[in-house]
């Protein structure tokens, strides 16, 4: 079979997907993106994963299962952290090993560059390891990466916002996956509410906001959530905050509790925490969001 790299549309694809796809496009290497998350992907991933896995990891495995029959390789970088002083949770650091064990893949089927931090040397080593696996010259790889990074930066420039009423906070792979958030978005649209997500705030601002928490937050994605919560809770134009979390997430289970007690309860902004799992039904989410919005309106009118 001619080379075809499978890219799962899950987890950090929702932060770096446009960088990865631009990179392989510029190299002229064929790749296949998995479909948007759907029930079949969810069910397959849930069956493959161990019970203790978080929901996003289950989904990720489902995406890989859907790619394997049509792809020669799977692109699954091992990312331990990409911001100074922070680390991603252990699931990210162990991702290639989880995939190898779940699907019994041969080493050369997995393109798993190692990203320890955002240093230039780490990025170069990662490019070289990808080039070696797919038989491309290092120079072509570096050139393609440089161009792709530019495309990605332009793609990620933060939009301006005004008259925002509802803030939605959560990991990018929950908020940007329509399968998880479609019900929340549908209710907000129906009520004609404008909204902003933590994804719209520049990372620099989120980390600055998170820097005031003591002891320091260890997990990088938790720091972003904490920064977004503090940032939104201080804005008068934000009339309500919805935190979206997933069942089985260790860092979120601690962080949500902490933020609820130390940030949200001390602010005047109404908030709702939604925990998603593979059994979460649309009706339950819609009812909770609608009730929250009613309460929010009632409070601002009284
Ligand atoms: S941060 Fe939580 S949701 Fe994300 S991969 Fe780790 S355990 Fe799963």
Image (tube, rainbow, N blue to C red):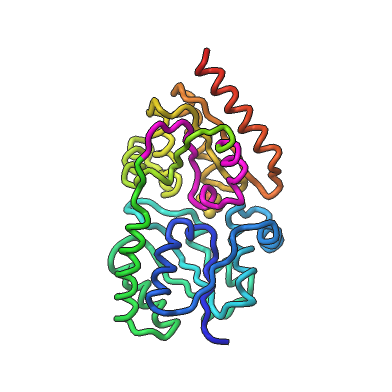
> Is residue 123 found left or right of 260 in the rendered image?
left
Residue 177: say if magenta: yes
Residue 284: where, in percent of width, then height?
69, 37
187 lies above or below 122 = above
Q: Which residues are magenta?
A: 161-188
17 lies above or below 250 = below
- The answer to whether residue 50 shows anywhere in this view is no
Q: Residue at x 69, y 56 (%)?
A: 39
Q: Residue furthest top?
A: 302
> Is residue 58 found left or right of 47 in the rendered image?
left
Q: Residue at x 42, y 63 (%)?
A: 18
Residue 275: where, in percent of width, then height?
61, 41
Pick the residue in front: 77 or 239.
239
Residue 102: say if magenta: no
Q: Residue at x 50, y 18 (%)?
A: 300
Residue 180: where, in percent of width, then height?
60, 48
28 lies above or below 249 = below
- The answer to whether residue 202 shows anywhere in this view is yes
Q: Quadrant of the N terminus?
A: bottom right
Residue 152: where, in percent of width, then height?
36, 61
Q: How many numbered dots are placed on residues in this image?
A: 0
């Amino acid at each position: 079979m001619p080379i075809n790299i499978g890219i799962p549309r899950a987890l950090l694809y929702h932060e770096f997907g446009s960088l990865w796809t631009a990179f392989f496009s510029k190299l002229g290497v064929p790749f296949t993106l998995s479909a948007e998350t759907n029930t079949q992907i969810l069910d397959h991933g849930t069956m493959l994963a161990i019970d203790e896995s978080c929901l996003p990891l289950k989904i990720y495995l489902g995406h890989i299962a859907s790619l394997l029959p049509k792809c020669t390789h799977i692109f699954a970088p091992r990312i331990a952290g990409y911001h100074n002083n922070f680390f991603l949770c252990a699931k990210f650091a162990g991702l290639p090993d989880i995939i190898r064990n779940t699907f019994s893949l041969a080493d050369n089927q997995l393109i798993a560059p190692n990203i320890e931090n955002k240093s230039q040397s780490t990025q170069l080593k990662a490019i070289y390891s990808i080039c070696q696996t797919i038989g491309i010259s290092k120079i072509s790889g570096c050139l393609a990466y440089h161009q792709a990074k530019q495309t990605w930066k332009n793609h990620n420039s933060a939009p301006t916002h005004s008259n925002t009423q509802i803030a939605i906070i959560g990991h990018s792979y929950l908020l940007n996956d329509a399968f998880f958030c479609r019900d929340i978005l549908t209710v907000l649209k129906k009520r004609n509410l404008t909204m902003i997500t933590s994804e719209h705030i520049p990372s620099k601002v989120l980390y600055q906001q998170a820097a005031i928490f003591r002891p320091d937050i260890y997990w990088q994605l938790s720091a972003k959530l904490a920064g977004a919560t503090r940032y939104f809770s201080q804005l008068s134009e934000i009339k309500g905050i919805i935190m979206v979390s997933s069942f089985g997430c260790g860092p979120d289970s601690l962080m949500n509790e902490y933020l609820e007690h130390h940030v949200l309860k001390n602010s005047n902004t109404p908030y709702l925490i939604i925990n998603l799992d593979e059994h979460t039904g649309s009706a339950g989410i819609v009812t909770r969001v609608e009730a929250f919005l009613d309460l929010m309106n009632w409070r601002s009118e009284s």
